[in-house]
Image (cartoon, rainbow, N blue to C red):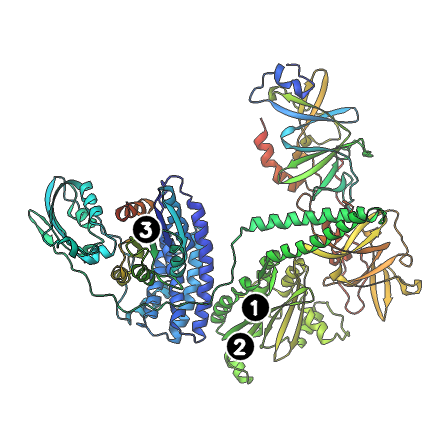
Amino acid sequence: MAKRILAVDDSKTMRDMVSFTLKKAGFDVAEAEDGKAALNVLTSGKFDLIITDLNMPNMDGISLIKNVRAGSQHRAVPILILTTESDGTKKADGKAAGATGWLVKPFNPEQLIATVNRVCP
Amino acid sequence: MQPDNKSAASFGQDLAVSENTKQFITFTLGPEEYGIDIMVVREIKGWTETTTIPNAPAHVRGVINLRGIIVPIFDLRARFGVGVTVPTSMHVVIIVAAGTRTVGLLVDTVSDIISVDPKDIRDVPDMGMPMEDQFLEGLVAIENRMVTLVSLAGLFGRSAELAKKNIAGDVAAKAA
Amino acid sequence: MSVTSDSEAYPIAQFRKTYFEECAELLDALQSNLELLAGGDEEDETLHAIFRSVHSIKGGAGAFGCTDLVAFSHIFESLLDALREHKVPATRDVKQLLLRASDALADIVNAARLEQPLPGNFAAEIRAAMQDSLQGSVDAPVAVAAQSTPESDVAGGEHTYRIVFRPHTEMLRKANEPLLLIRELCKLGVLTTEVDSAALPALEAIDPEAAYLSWTFTLETVASLNAIQDVFEFVEDDCDLKIEQLDIAPEPAETAGSDPAGAVPTATGPAPAQSIRVDVDKVDRLVNLVGELVISQAMLTEQGLSLPADQYPTLIQGIEALAQSARELQESVMAIRAQPVKSVFARMPRIVRELAATLGKEVRIVTSGEMTEIDKTVIEQLNDPLTHMIRNALDHGIEPPAERLADGKPRQGTILLSAAQRSGRIVIEVSDDGRGINREKVLAKAQARGLVPAGASPSDEDIDNLIFLPAFSTADVISNISGRGVGMDVVKRNVQALGGRISVRSKFGQGSSFSLSLPLTLAVVDGMVVSVGDETFIIPLVAIVENLRPQAADIHPIVGRGDVLALRGEYLPLVYLHRAFAIGGAIADPCRGIVIIVQSESAGRVGIVVDELLGQQQVVVKSLEANYEPVDGISGATILGNGRVALILDVGRLHEIDIRGTDSRLPLPETSRIEPAEDMTHAA
């Protein structure tokens, strides 16, 4: 059964590209445009990985991670955060909030898939 | 010179289709027979009343409604300078794609589809006819008829310049 | 993601397109929020939103290799980050800088989209200013986005490493699996594993989520130390890690950081209105199809009229119901294509900012009615006339600050830009509180050019409208701001081409107000159907003032100028359509036909002589030019209920074809008859 990934980012471009790459690699991908929407999607079923941006309206990435880790269903699900190199403190915040790993933007499809495989085989 | 077949149905059987063969639809204006590249022909319909365009040249008969688009109809006889057509329901309009435009050509009848090897197309001799050379792609003999092949690029009067810009590319591409 | 061209079947063009569409929205939101900021809104959420817009633009820029865009948005983002963290105060200067930066960003995005290079020093001054503002903050940003450090490979050779790894519970809580790490290590070379389970308690005491195990790995690999460290990249904070190679100092493991800080506030904005994005092409196709439907329905209606009603009651009812539905469908579909004028209005503040700065004037622009909707075909064409009018207001209307103060006006000039729907049309007003029209100067100039006869005393309104005449400018030198051809005559032509009207009201010393009246859509026109001989024409209702059948006594021939109609003290030129269009079999005597009085900007009031009025109809406008060419006096075509084509008159230009009359108030310049069409039937 294919692994399910939830991609969370307020940029449609980013969602499109991540979705495309992961679907091509054989994953099922759902999308959400901010943390709040993501939490909604997560109630709809079981996910094997969450990939999230940090800067989003309505509920940002850090809050999303905290919510997920404090919840019951996806408490132990791997979470990857999308950061930019200059996002130093944000990355630390993300990790502290419970993120499993990160991907540094800009990244290419190969890097995305490699990182996904590292945390969610 | 290969004799050609009259009907399109039997076309494939007798004549080996070389990659260079061009097909033309032939039509008549009075006793003369002409051919036009089949690749530009979109549709053949009967004559219907046009809406006159004010102050247009004699060969612009007007416009018709062709399934929602406005298409101008050109009287080829007038365009060739050999008279004016008095159209009846027996007359035929050939709808062609001229570059990005769709236009209609009013002719007497449409007769045939012919296949022509470009090698067989002769240049038009200068016989002092009233037609301009730019109308004509050449002459070809089919059985014992002479068919004058017309090119779209030269056919348009007032819009010749505009039409040429659209079609020139097409014609240049099609020129054998 | 950064996309390389050899990614197989990667639809990069599609993603690029999406990205730049997104940029357009982001830039819009950015500008709106910056204006809120400039207006005094310093809420955290506003600052965050501003940051996010630039952050998102930067993110995508990296993915598509737009290096200029990355560089500029990086420094912009850094400044915005400092701003939202309150490390840099939001002073008035900073706010102005941000506005200028967002303008520059829009330009750079555009250049990136069009793949056009920008000059090396583009926006250098803005960049420097942003850098300066950042120096005042606690942490100065990295100047350029740093590349990730390349792997330093030890040249050749296999080495053996000893890795001691003890995960903390925290690591497991973050869903980092030791097993996955072990697999990663295995990929690097030959791995031997030794597990230490000393810390493992008795079964009943085990906390399934805690970490008890630790490992000692021996790895024989040609990979570099960096590569090994990378395997533990995600977990290094949450474990004890020691990697040693024979003669290289082991990397100290870093223990887990402190507890996370307090919760980040989750701001919830107002829920946006539900909407979906649709390709413009799809909408156009839909509009065309509905247009076809309406035509077919009209044909059915027409056929239905000729049926005896009592014999086919159901059919006739059905046709009526169909007509009703078709009308509603058409309105709904037209509404889909309607967009708020906001997209055009949004560009104006920037124009005002830049031009005011260049001219040394202080001007603000206030917009209202941005959500007024107008068909997209009209919106696209609004940009030019609006831009010209605003530039004009800035150039000629609003005075320099010193002059304004001397006149008792506030230093800062104001331009009001508004849009509203009024009786089926869109009315757009551009007003300024500047100098107003100097009527003496205008009249003098018009007289000097022979546009107004000496001795005529035109009303104030007439003089104001003189500025719409071609090549008319009150500036003695055409300033290089307004440039050539940006006179009000060009604006008027633009507006008329849209089927609109423009007029001006002005009070000298107080300001001017231009009013544009535009049709809601270009695609549909309410028309009066008229016949001339055997031909049928449509005259747009919007141009019609009245119709009448004149008395013979009211028709006066003017030598060399054709006929005029006397109507309530005015003399209106008459245009005989049958003559203008060479139509046979028409009614030549206006007293037996109908005269339709039409109003156009170019010809004023004119009476068009036709045979009969056949009725009113809303018609779908079809292009004559798509397959043919422009025809003088005709603005388009439509398909009537009987399936026949009818031509739509361009009333403003009819006079050029036939008129030989004059308006008695202000004589028009002589126009010559158009030469008969070139006769192409004879060989050159």
Cα–Cα gap, marks 3 and 2: 57 Å
> Pointer 2 indicates a residue of which chain?
C
Task: Check the image and report above or below for C429 versus B145.
Answer: below
Question: What type is the residue that disc 3 sits on?
Answer: Leu
Q: Residues within 10 Å of mark 2 (few under 14, many from 20)?
A: many
* Closer mark to the observer between disc 3 and disc 2: 3
Lateral position of residue C34 relative to residue C610, left or right = left
C-alpha separation, residue under disc 3 versus residue under disc 1: 53 Å
Residue linked to disc 3: A49
Q: Taking C491 as reference, is C125 left or right? A: left
Q: The disc labelled 2 sits on which kind of residue?
A: Gly
* Helix, strand or loop status at disc 3: strand
Residue C139 percent location from the top left of the image: 26, 68
Secondary structure beneath label 1: helix
Q: Quadrant of residue C389?
A: bottom right
Mark 3 vs mark 1, foreground winner is 3
- Towards the viewer: C635 or A120: A120
Q: Which residue is mark 2?
A: C413
